[in-house]
Image: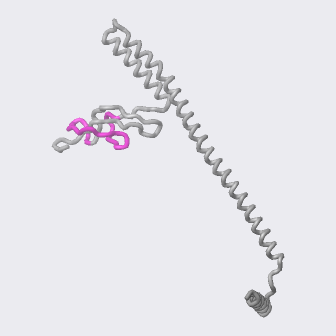
Amino acid sequence: MSEVREEVREDKTADTEEQATQAGQEAPPAEAGEDLARALEEARALAAEHYDRYLRAAAELDNFRKRTARLRTEARDETLREVLIRVAPALDNMRRALAQESATIESFKQGLELIHDQLQEALKGYGLEEIQAVGQPFDPLCHEALAEVESPEHPPGTVVEEMEKGYRLRDKVVRPARVVVSKTGGQNG
């Protein structure tokens, strides 16, 4: 039985070689297998190099993110420290004013005005400015209307009273001024 199998294998091998020769092709030499193995090995080495570069780039990006977050935190903390240093004298003055027992209402009021001015100057050093509102036309970018009142002295849409000051940091509104706006007589608001 094994003889029959060997004959069938030999016949198949001979048929394949004949077909390859008839088609004008020769059987692949052993060198072609070596070339493929070499090419495969080069591709694997290139893939390993690219993977290593990828891992290094990913690690650099992660380190950059951590470094940037740390720098942002340090900058925020340093800015906060500077603000506190500028505000601390006003807090000291407020504590001194509260400790005064013989202060009259007028002297107490003057002390509070000095503290207010001191705080305002400290914050102005960082670019914080008050938004001027009273007498100005209502601007929804800078003002928040709390109410409308009839006012024959003011044209409609004019700010007649400021309930809370608004503030701008350089050109950006930090907090809009909360205001009362005039309207013409006879309108329902």
Q: Nearer the viewer, residue 14 or 55?
A: 14
Q: Residue furthest front?
A: 1
Check the image and report above or below for 4 versus 52: below
- Chief SS of the magenta region: loop
Would you say residue 168 is visible in this rendering? Answer: yes
Where does the magenta region start and end? 133-156
- Which percent across, then down, holds residue 60? 65, 47
Quarter holding residue 147: top left
Give x and y (percent) for residue 181: 27, 38
Q: Residue at x 21, y 42 (%)?
A: 184
On screen, residue 131 above or below 84: below
Quadrant in the rendering for residue 149: top left
Q: Residue 24: give x, y in percent of width and height.
A: 79, 91
Does residue 16 appear in the picture of this structure? no
Residue 183 is a magenta residue: no
Please tell me whether residue 155 belongs to the stretch shown in magenta: yes
Q: Residue furthest top?
A: 102
Q: In the image, 157: left or right of 67?
A: left
Direction from residue 13 to residue 139 in the image, left or right? left
Q: Is residue 4 above or below residue 50?
A: below
For the residue pair 114 and 87, the one nearer the viewer reads as: 87
Is 183 placed left or right of 60 in the picture?
A: left
In depth, the one of 9 and 66 nearer the eye is 9
**Is 91 rendered above or below residue 124?**
above
Quadrant containing the C terminus is: top left
Nearer the observer, 16 or 161 = 16
Which quarter of the figure is the N terminus placed in?
bottom right
Q: Residue at x 34, y 8 (%)?
A: 103
Residue drawn 75% across the image and 68% down it: 40
Q: Residue at x 59, y 44 (%)?
A: 65
